[in-house]
């Protein structure tokens, strides 16, 4: 089965409301989620960040939530992001940044609300000396996300953006970014049509390399967010060959994914940061992680068998 067919099948299955109910209400779903999400609360995320720190790894905290449909939910999400930055300020030994999804701040229904909530979040980040990176969501949000990012970054420094190498439009988007801003480069986690995103893995990988080189040449700070060892090694070699300081390049991976690589690159002396998601709205995040890799279905099924 090709990767895209597998992703479509998982995408279809995980959009069934009954499956979401089953996953979120049973210990089975929670057991599967715990591999990728350390817990529901900010405390659990901070505990995970401390454990990572003990191994020399930094963290980026991500409150789970997306596509809110009411102003109250957007304001509550911004409040939660701000609370996470207050905690980061208290825990002086930790090197933590924060990642936000604009649809969690209301982008889906009000640009104005999303802007004002993001301003509150970034204002708090500046007081804590924390970086806020905006996640990139499905392709229908890319224009709006970049638009809000450009606007807010004209007034604030501690803000970065994620770009998806799999999207055909990304080389063009890259040219519209504010000078030298922080960019997290990822392959892209959302199921997109072939007109919008490269369907073949080797084309995505080649685009990832091209985007990385181009971002470095343009003076951006680049967060290389992948678990692909060849891309990670290539990024390290390219940065070294061009004498790019490590303050401008960082390797990023997801909590619970390729811990071996997280440790290996840290031991080799490279800066590594792990995305630590938390919150009770973990189902869409878990669905994306399962869809990324057919082998994760064995993990899913073995948990189901163990539960019986
Ligand atoms: P690829 O899928 O080719 O995997 C390479 C190897 O990594 C696999 O062979 C396997 O060993 C391992 N692996 C990858 N995924 C795994 C999984 N789920 N479970 C177990 N092993 C796995 N995307 C997006 O669209 N918007 C965003 O804002 C972000 N943000 C983000 C932040 C950070 C810090 C990271 C690391 C990733 C993201 N992503 C993202 C997700 C990204 O787009 C991508 O879907 C995943 O990183 C998986 O792709 P890889 O680059 O790892 O490559």
Image (tube, grey):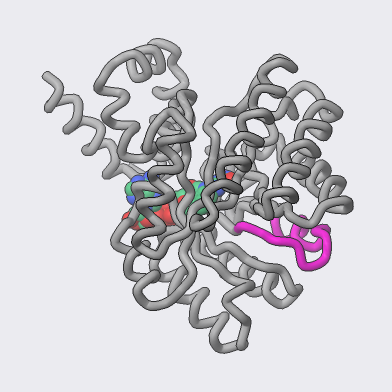
Q: In which quarter of the view is residue 136 placed?
A: top right
Query: Residue sitting at 75 percent across and 60 percent down?
Result: 174
Q: Is residue 299 left or right of residue 130?
A: left
Tell me where residue 298 appears, x and y as whole percent.
Answer: 22, 38
In the image, what residue occupies the spot 64% across and 27% down? 77
On the image, the x and y values in percent for residue 61 come to 53, 44
**Is residue 128 shown above or below 41?**
below
Q: How many marks?
A: 0
Q: Is residue 171 magenta?
A: yes
Q: Nearer the viewer, residue 67 or 38?
A: 38
At 67% from the left and 28% from the top, the residue drawn is 79
| Residue 292: percent from left, percent from top | 41, 44
Please identify the quadrant where the C terminus is shown: top left
One can see residue 162 in this view: yes
Residue at 88% across, 53% down = 154
Q: Which residues are magenta?
A: 170-184
**Residue 183 figure quarter:** bottom right
Q: Quadrant of the N terminus?
A: top left
Q: Is residue 48 left or right of residue 127?
A: left
Q: Is residue 65 magenta?
A: no
């Amino acid at each position: 089965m090709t990767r895209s067919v597998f992703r479509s099948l998982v995408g279809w299955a995980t959009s069934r409301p009954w499956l979401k109910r089953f996953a979120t209400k049973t210990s089975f779903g929670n057991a599967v989620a715990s591999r990728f999400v350390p817990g529901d609360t900010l405390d659990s995320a901070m505990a995970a960040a401390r454990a990572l720190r003990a191994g020399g790894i930094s963290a980026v905290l991500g409150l789970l939530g997306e596509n809110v449909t009411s102003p109250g939910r957007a304001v509550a999400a911004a409040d939660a992001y701000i609370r996470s930055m207050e905690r980061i300020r208290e825990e002086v030994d930790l090197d933590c940044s924060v990642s936000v999804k604009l649809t969690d701040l209301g982008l889906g229904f009000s640009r104005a609300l999303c802007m004002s909530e993001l301003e509150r979040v970034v204002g708090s980040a500046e007081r804590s000396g924390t970086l806020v990176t905006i996640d990139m969501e499905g392709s229908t949000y890319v224009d709006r996300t970049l638009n809000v990012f450009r606007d807010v970054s004209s007034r604030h420094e501690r803000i970065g953006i994620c770009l998806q190498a799999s999207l055909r439009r990304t080389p063009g988007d890259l040219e519209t970014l504010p000078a030298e801003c922080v960019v997290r480069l990822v392959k892209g986690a959302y199921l997109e049509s072939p007109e919008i995103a490269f369907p073949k893995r080797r084309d995505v990988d080649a685009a990832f390399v091209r985007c990385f080189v181009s971002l470095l040449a343009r003076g951006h700070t680049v967060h290389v967010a992948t678990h692909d060892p060849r891309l990670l090694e290539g990024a390290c070699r390219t940065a070294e060959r061009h004498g790019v300081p490590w303050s401008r390049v960082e390797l990023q991976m997801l909590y619970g994914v390729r811990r071996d690589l997280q440790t290996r690159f840290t031991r080799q002396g490279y800066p590594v940061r792990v995305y630590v998601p938390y919150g009770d709205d973990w189902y869409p995040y878990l669905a994306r992680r399962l869809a990324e890799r057919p082998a994760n279905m064995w993990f899913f099924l073995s948990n189901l068998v163990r539960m019986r």
